Amino acid sequence: MSSVPFKIRYLPGNLARVEGVARLEPDALVLEFRTVDALVGVLRSRPREVRIGLNDVESIDFRRGWFGGRLRIATQRMTALEAIPGARGLEVVLKCRRRDRAAGAELAATLRLHVAEKHLEELRGAAQQADAADEAQGGTRTAS
């Protein structure tokens, strides 16, 4: 899977923006970014990296627009997004350019698949624990 470049405008009057790259790893969505002043683009912060665990992802949505796309990521915990400038509460919107729309849509679909697989593994584990508990109870009843 390739990475998807993104931007976030986060200060009133669009005085600053976040430029970065989103990529998917086996256990997390990784956002690498830096803050840039929107007027001249000269003032830049050091690159930062935020890892959003797959267990924290509530939903992901990609919407195509005329000039680009928007990748909306919603989480279950506010702390998962607290280090990302421009994140609002439980969600953050990453804007991508027109040429990166296909990669953004692919990232969203792949992330949804990974999150669904993670939830399915958790359900299987819970079902196996319940089966083991039922067998343990059933074994003690027949022995009595």
Image (cartoon, rainbow, N blue to C red):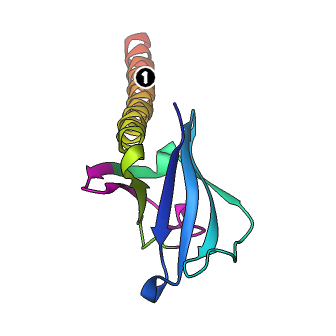
Q: Position of residue 22 (x, y in %)?
A: 54, 48
- Residue pictured at 38% horizontal, 35% vertical: 106
Which quadrant: the C terminus?
top left
Residue 66 is inside the magenta segment: yes
Q: Is residue 6 above or below residue 129?
A: below
Residue span colored magenta: 61-85
Q: Position of residue 51 (x, y in %)?
A: 61, 51
Q: Position of residue 85 (x, y in %)?
A: 55, 72
Q: Is residue 75 visible?
A: no
The amino acid sitting under disc 1 is Gln
Query: Toward the viewer: 93 or 138?
Result: 93
Residue 78 is inside the magenta segment: yes
Query: Toward the viewer: 119 or 36?
Result: 36
Q: Quadrant of residue 127?
A: top left
Mark 1 nearby-residue class (10 Å; few <14, some 14–19, many ≥20): few
Q: Position of residue 8 (x, y in %)?
A: 47, 67
Element class at badge 1: helix
* Farthest residue, direction top: 143
In this rendering, would 117 be left or right of 7?
left
- Residue pictured at 52% horizontal, 64% vertical: 81
Q: Is residue 20 above or below residue 140?
A: below
Residue on which disc 1 sits: 128
